[in-house]
Image (spheres, rainbow, N blue to C red):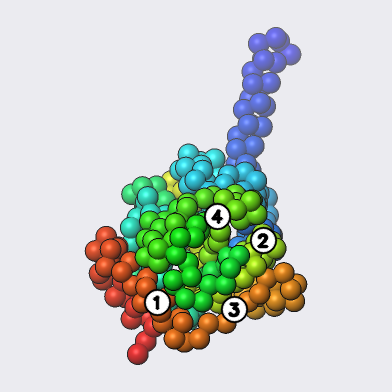
Amino acid sequence: MRKSSLFHALLAGATLALLSGIAHAEIVIKFSHVVAENTPKGKGALLFKKLAEERLKGKVTVEVYPNSSLFGDGKEMEALLLGDVQLIAPSLSKFDRYTKQVQVFDLPFLFKNIDAVHRFQNGPTGQAILSSMKKKGLTGLGYWDNGMKQLSANKPLRKPEDAKGMKFRIQSSDILEAQFKAVGAFPQKLAFSEVYQALETGVVDGAENPWSNIYSQKFFEVQKYISETNNGYLGYMLVTNTKFWDGLPADVRKTLEEILTEVTVQVNKWATEFSDSDRQKIKDSGKSEILALTPEELAAWKKAMKSVYDQFTSAIGKDVVDAALASNGK
Ligand code: LMR
């Protein structure tokens, strides 16, 4: 073969190899989150990986990064917008820079139970919130539960007055800030990965968390009391980069959406189970005393925090708040 034809043959071969490489290039989905693997979100991320890699074998790989190991609070949303990760599931309290509507979930004592939360999330308003950030580059793919929040501290909190002057760690939400100010406490926004140390060293005196986070992060080892207040809902929005998602081959996107629907059902089941079993494990440990509050005591907390509604309803949208309240039924 002459030198130039050998060159052309090599070039053609290389081009072919490159093209087939492109055709078979696997889509990598990096899924970053801040909680432990033995939590509803942690297990959900792993189940999503398993099903996606089984059903889209050779087409999709999912890398899961738990425990803020890739990006923590404050960084994960930016990373998603920059394309450094493709899937995250921040708590609903962490979206207020992108949409005010989602703040509805932070209103204290809003939902009477998880069924009411689901009615709202699956109804027209809840579904509209999922697409409310599209123009900003974020597409909501669904909601995942963790559970109802409980108040923990090193002294027993029974009445709202007991919280006066105490420092509480909060997620980065202005509503949660107002909620603690309403009872005369000092809220402090801190990333999730910093909470254990802040509680241990007394940087803050208390916090609010669902049972699975209190257990899996060992917060109960550094908090003597947990008041069973169920004062708010902690759930997640599964969110992706709009450009990435819309750019996926239609069949891949459809399969991933089906998988997410399936995983959501399972995550919400785990959330109910973890709420019971982690509460029981904390009780059995004897390290933290669980305080059951009377209906009168709970009513006092609710009343003390009511002013938060007046402060935030117009920013969230009265229609959104009303739809959430209506999900409680008569
Ligand atoms: C928190 O910061 O307390 C939670 O949002 C953590 C989580 O993802 O459950």
Asked if residue 195 is positioned above or below residue 163 in the image, the reply reads above
Q: CA distance from mark 1 to mark 3?
A: 17 Å
Q: Mark 3 vs mark 2: which is more N-terminal? A: 2
Residue toward you, 17 or 247:
247
Q: Which residue is mark 4?
A: 204
Amino acid type at mark 4: Val
Q: Is disc 4 in contact with disc 3, using a CB cutoff of under 8 Å?
A: no
Locate the C terminus by quadrant: bottom left
Q: Residues within 10 Å of mark 1 (few under 14, many from 20)?
A: some
**Which dot marks residue 291?**
3
Q: CA distance from mark 1 to mark 4?
A: 23 Å
Q: CA distance from mark 4 to mark 2?
A: 11 Å
Q: Which percent across, then down, holds residue 271? A: 60, 72
Q: CA distance from mark 2 to mark 1?
A: 26 Å
- Residue plotted at (63% across, 51% down): 201
Amino acid type at mark 1: Lys
Residue at disc 2, CB closer than 8 Å to ligand 1? no
- Nearer to us of marks 1 and 4 is 4
Q: Is residue 244 left or right of residue 46?
A: left
Q: Which residue is mark 2?
A: 222
Residue at disc 3, CB closer than 8 Å to ligand 1? no
Q: Mark 1 vs mark 3: which is more N-terminal? A: 3
